[in-house]
Amino acid sequence: MRREGRVKSATYGNTAQGNAGKIEKLLRQIVNGVDANEDGSVSWEEGEGDLAQAEHHVGFMLKGEGLT
């Protein structure tokens, strides 16, 4: 069962809270990235990128194509 299903079907508050916390952690990683190699920053290294970096990179591409 997927995490969101576990949260919905949890019969105990602590189970739902624990699964909700896991979902929150995953969402934060998507938005903020992960310092997977522990060098103090999030970069384009494998497993580290985030939505903000992707948006920044798209900006470079748009600028390069003369679309901004």
Image (cartoon, rainbow, N blue to C red):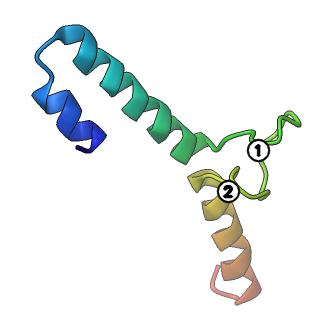
Which quadrant holds residue 4? Answer: top left
Q: What element carries label 1?
A: loop
9 vs 35, left or right, is left
Residue occupying image coordinates x 61% and y 41%: 32
Disc 2 crowd, CA 10 A, few/some/many (<14, 14-19, 20+): some
Label 1 amino acid?
Answer: Val
The picture places residue 28, in percent across and down from the top left corner, at 51, 36
Determine the secondary structure under disc 2. Answer: helix
What is the x, y in percent for residue 12?
A: 16, 11
| Circle 1 crowding by C-alpha within 10 Å: few under 14, some 14–19, many from 20 | some
Q: Which mark is residue 42?
A: 1
Image height of 66 relative to 58, above or below? below
Q: In this view, does 64 lie to the left or right of 26?
A: right
Query: What is the CA distance from the residue labelled 2 to the residue labelled 1?
Result: 9 Å
**Mark 2 or mark 1, which is nearer to you?**
1
Residue hosting label 2: 53
The disc, 2 or 1, on the residue closer to the chain's N-terminal end is: 1
